Amino acid sequence: MKIAQRFKDFPAYSPIEPFEVLSARIGKRPEEIIKLDANENPYGPCTAALQALTDTRVYHIYPDPESRALRAALQKFTGVPIQYLMAGSGADELIDLILRVLLEPGDTVINCPPTFGMYPFDTRLNAGQVIDIPRNADFSIDIEAIEITVKNNQPKVIFVTSPNNPDGSLLSKADLLHLLKLPLLVVLDEAYLEFTGDCVAAWRENSCMGWVQNFNNLVVLRTFSKWAGLAGLRVGYGAFPLWLMSVLWVAKQPYNVNVAASQAAIASLQSLEELIPNVNKLRSERERLWQLLQNIPFINPYPSQANFILCALEDVSGTELKHYLISKGIFIRTYDTPNLRNTIRISVGRPAQTVQLISALEEYQ
Ligand SMILES: Cc1ncc(COP(=O)(O)O)c(C=O)c1O
């Protein structure tokens, strides 16, 4: 039996490791670990989500394949009609699903690095070819190069992210409108959108999810992993044009959103008064962390609209700094790619975690 050719030298995705693995590796207790490497929410799920997980009594019954209760709650939350909405096992599942239904072997997909690694990973997984169009120095997308590539290569899909991971910059609405005029599907990933504003009205204003009703070539993805602290439960959602919805319903795994994830997500949408203050704590901590990082001589932080800060390093090695911080129980993410040389990304944590991080950085060298 032979495996498919494309898996012979397949570049594996390197996922972030959980507390227990990290703590076992460095001989510290999980509660001593300061995990600032995966943009998780240190405040965790809301009380009602935790309560829903223990109160639920239907774990022996398969979940609703259409996630009806969750989608109805999302309609109220986003203002987007339910027929445009689909839930998934994280936004990650929806990225894969979109490519699964659209790509024929060899079809091309535009990726704009530096950005989230799942877009090229899922493209290759689904037998597509990635065309990288690097971002400009300020992390905006290179519209001109994208237009040329669309003309020459007829890509089927482009992925754009706002705020972008790893730098936290926003996609301008003008750039999005530009892309929407091109003959390809634009997938806008808004995983960190909630960190751009301080209330539901601001989130609606900043999100382009409602635009799917007017643009046949736009998909917008969001998630409960970041603002609602449900990363471990895997629940995300997207708004899709109706022609795409009909095929996604056919192609998705029937029970893709499990009962626990669905209950916790619905409870989160009913607990905005508890969750929004956590988002706002992270927003103000982001500004405080940014100021403090400015005072570290070898760190140049970029401005960010998300729950993480990208930093260029001067005269120190990212890998060495990462290992030094690990010895203190602090985990961050490093990058050293052609588009992002010697750079680190720090997720925003609780104020006490910022204090420990900054004092470790002050002691460095
Ligand atoms: C830009 C972006 N999109 C999507 C995701 C994944 O979201 P989910 O946890 O809902 O799969 C991440 C996770 O880090 C991300 O950075």
Image (cartoon, grey):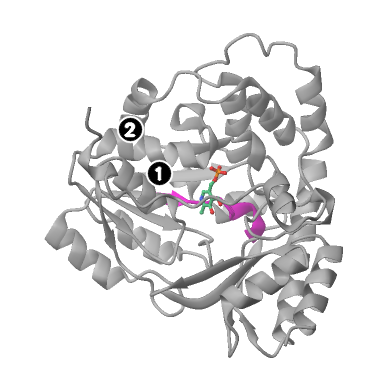
Rounded to the nearest angstrom, the CA distance separating label 2 from label 1 is: 9 Å
Which sits earlier in the primary sequence, circle 2 or circle 1? 1
Q: Is residue 322 left or right of residue 254?
A: right
Along the line of sight, which residue is nearer the eye, 314 or 259? 314
| Type of the residue with mark 1 | Val
User: Does the closest atom of ligand 1 sit within 8 Å of the Cβ of label 2?
Assistant: no
Residue 321 in view of the camera? yes
User: Going 44% across and 32% down the picture, which residue do you hit?
Assistant: 84
- Disc 1: CA contacts within 10 A as few (<14), some (14-19) or many (>=20): many
Q: Give residue 319's position: percent from left, percent from top.
A: 57, 74
- Asked whether 159 falls inside the magenta stretch, the response is no
The boundaries of the magenta stretch are 187-196
- Disc 2: CA contacts within 10 A as few (<14), some (14-19) or many (>=20): some
Contact flag, marks 2 and 1 (Cβ < 8 Å): yes
Quarter of the image for the C terminus: give it. Answer: bottom right
| Type of the residue with mark 2 | Leu
Q: Mark 2 points at which residue?
A: 244
Quarter of the image for the N terminus: give it. Answer: top left
- Please tell me how many numbered marks the rendered image carries: 2
Q: Label 1's element?
A: strand
Q: Give residue 312's position: percent from left, percent from top.
A: 56, 81
User: Does the closest atom of ligand 1 sit within 8 Å of the Cβ of label 1?
Assistant: no
Is 10 located above or below residue 322 in the figure? above
Instruction: State the mark number for residue 184.
Output: none
> Where on the picture, by quarter, is residue 159?
bottom left
Q: Give residue 3's position: percent from left, percent from top.
A: 25, 34
Q: Mark 1 points at which residue?
A: 219
User: Going 56% across and 20% down the picture, which residue do you hit?
Assistant: 68
Q: In this view, does 166 lie to the left or right of 364?
A: left
User: Going 64% across and 42% down the picture, which residue do you hit?
Assistant: 231
